[in-house]
Amino acid sequence: MASETAEGTTLEVLRRLESGPRGLTETEAASRLADSGENTLPDRRTPSWPRRCVRALRDPFTAVLLCLGLASAVVASWGTAVVILALVAVSCVLRASGEHRADRSLAALRELVAGTATVLRRPDAQEPPEPREVPVAELVPGDVLRLGPGDLVPADLRLLRARGLAVYQGALTGESAPVAKRVVDEDDPDEPHLCFQGSTVASGSATAVVVATGAATRFAAARRVPDTPQEGGAFDRSVHGISWVLIRFMLLTPPLVLMANATLRDRGLETLPFAVAVAVGLTPEMLPVIVTTCLARGAALLARAHAVIVKRLPALHDLGAVDVLCVDKTGTLTQDRPVVERALDPAGRDDPEVLRWAAVGAWWTLQLAELPAPDALDEALLEAAGPVGEKYDGVDAVPFDPVRRTATAVVRGDLGQHTVVVTGAAEAVLERCATAPGERERLLALAAREADAGLRVLAVATAGRTAGAGTADARGLAFRGLVTFRDALAPTAANALRELADRGVTVKVLTGDHPATAARACRDLGLDPGEVRTAAQLVDAPGETATVVARCTPEDKARVVAALRAAGHTVGFLGDGVNDVAALRAADVGIAPRSAVGVARESADVVLAEKDLTAIGHAITAGRHASGNIASYLRVTLSSNLGNVVAMLAAGLLLPFLPMLPAQVLAQNLCFDAAQLAFAHDRPGAAVLRGPAVLRPRSFLRFAVGFGMLNALADLATFAVLALALDGPDAVDDEAVFHSAWFTENLLTQAAVMLLLRTGRVGAAGRAPGPVGLASAGLAVVGLLLPPSPLGSALGMTALPAAYYLLPAVVLGLYALVLAAARHRRRQP
């Protein structure tokens, strides 16, 4: 590991690496590259097509269909077996192709940690070292690198020389501010002498030796974190719950049918195909296809319209079910830069002169120091005050030093007088100021008050100096005042937070920043932070009631996410660093931006083009649309199928013949299933977006039982009407007439159910019918025209007498009115 290799003094580390300040020779580098391998992270293999298809068979509904297909083949019901097994194959191919397409899109978004690095290499041992650009993959332990502002750290490094070096290492530690790095000759638990792969140089320059590459870096260590077993996401839990209830019904139905017919009608094994057909009728055969089609369409639209890649199709439903979204502050609610809030004089009043002198110091520090780019605070000062430093002539400058915690600039004045401008931490600047007794404590309290309000504070002091006087250690300064900074808000964050709140999503902020800083950003965006908690305060109440959790370590984030899931929430987590990997895996839906480190992208279920809450809002909307269509299918098919099965069982016990032949049951199921494919293309109403789209098994089953019994009553009422209305050669004991009448009535009833129980929009006058409306009309037409057709004759059906279409039509009309009224009174699951 990098920490083990980097232990000891600088000289000991170089000896252990068999290197030196002059770097390696070309021969040594080539030999080490052959021994240690390329400086790349091992890429995870994606599943093959056969593996994806086999994995799709583990889906509970697909497994149920497979069992029913095999059972149909055992009893020689070949038509049923072929159709069911074909549905299984289509479902597996659709799911595998959707996941393959998502993986292929993600592969196109992958970015390398760095392209090239500046390395000191020697042609041979006698030649002087020369800086040259080499591919990052060719770096080896012992190489000596040069770093500058904006460079990505391509391996784990030990500093040999550094000047004003600060790095962003939030991808590893979660810290939003640059971390100062310096050369130390002994081990320090804070590791200021080490830079790690995945970091970015914010300012300064350095020379460093490579101590670890490839899989030995800390960046790669996160890949070796074992995946902890956990229950699936919200979609998997819901589908498993519904599936196992249906499996129990499916296993009980054939024995019950056989026993009842054997006892009451003296019909035994000859009713076995009918019993299997009834079991098939109870199962939502098209669910795998509907689910995969809905999710694949939603994922494709997201990728095309908003550049959001859904890597795991069920994650799209889980997005729709999210009711808690955990995010970081930096880069999500705020940008990675500060902006000036106020400039205060020593009395705490607004004073633009304080800002002007701070900007003069920043300007000439940039011009005269060796830093090629300003740090974030300098950029904010110059943006707020403009190029005021151009009015002066700069003499000297000393950039910010993390030890002194000040920066100093000297500008030329009149008659040999110069002005020294010192900026930095309030404590460090006040130590150099001439203040009255008690004044220093008052000014420190003023700075602390601003810091407690969530602002970053920069103290400003000036002094007159004669030409040639020292610069770095100027004393006797006059305290000018304070400049305060706040984090620049993400431009779309406020609107996105409001939209998420309107959709019933609670946003929680998990950040490593100071509590006051996080609370200030939330208030500025209109998000009530409530009582800000730190991670140390969440031992007993891990985050369910806290809106903002500050001082979070990676383990704290994962703990909060797991606790929220344990409390019954469906949790999404947005993260982009190695420190976020544990929380990404603990969430129902892990979300990462395209700019995230590779291991975070691979751990995520959803990848965004940008780290933007608006994109998450689009993804949640797409998830709820897909979930609404799936819910419509489940609601319609479960209630209709259950009603038909109950009616068939009752009629089977009352009639001297089977109420419907197995082939007719299969034909009815095929027509109904084909019509229900329209749900994959439906657009649910606005009500679907107002809350999390969760498929609750108990709620669905209660709904199915209630409306299924209503459907069964309609079927039995139609049976009674047939018994009363038909006589003579068309009497109800005519098997062909009864089968044909019930076939037509069932399809008409199912067409009405599709329209009335869907999660759709109320059609406006003049609006063209949607896909579900067209499919319902087509289903009704098939129900009316199939029995008298040649295909109907082949299925054992016949043309119906004219009298059939009168009284049963009244029954169907009454059923539709009762169904509509019951739907409005009952909350849909």
Image (cartoon, helix red, strand yellow):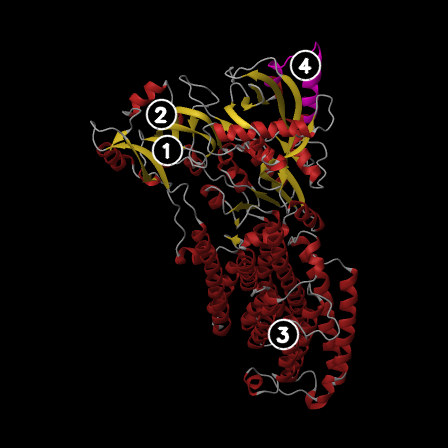
* x and y, in percent, of residue 225 in the image: 45, 36
* x and y, in percent, of residue 60 in the image: 53, 56
Q: Which mark is residue 216?
A: 1
Residue 21 belongs to the span the image colors magenta: no
Q: Which circle, 3 or 1, is nearer the viewer?
A: 1
Q: Is residue 656 visible?
A: no
**Magenta stretch: dominant SS?**
helix
* x and y, in percent, of residue 544 in the image: 67, 37
Q: Is residue 342 above or below residue 302?
A: above
Is the residue under label 4 in contact with that under label 2 (CB below 8 Å)? no
**CA gap, disc 2 and disc 4:** 46 Å
Q: Residue at x 66, y 48 (%)?
A: 496
Q: Is residue 374 above or below residue 250?
A: above
Q: Which residues are magenta?
A: 428-450
**CA gap, disc 3 and disc 4:** 80 Å
Is the residue under label 2 in contact with that under label 1 (CB below 8 Å)? yes
Among the two numbered marks 2 and 4 on one chain, the one whose residue lies closer to the N terminus: 2
Q: Residue at x 41, y 55 (%)?
A: 51
Residue holding disc 2: 5
Residue 444 belongs to the span the image colors magenta: yes
Label 3, secondary structure: give it.
Answer: helix
Among the two numbered marks 3 and 2 on one chain, the one whose residue lies closer to the N terminus: 2
Q: Is residue 307 above or below residue 170?
A: below
Label 1, secondary structure: give it.
Answer: helix
In the figure, residue 622 lies in which quadrant? bottom right
Q: Residue at x 51, y 60 (%)?
A: 62
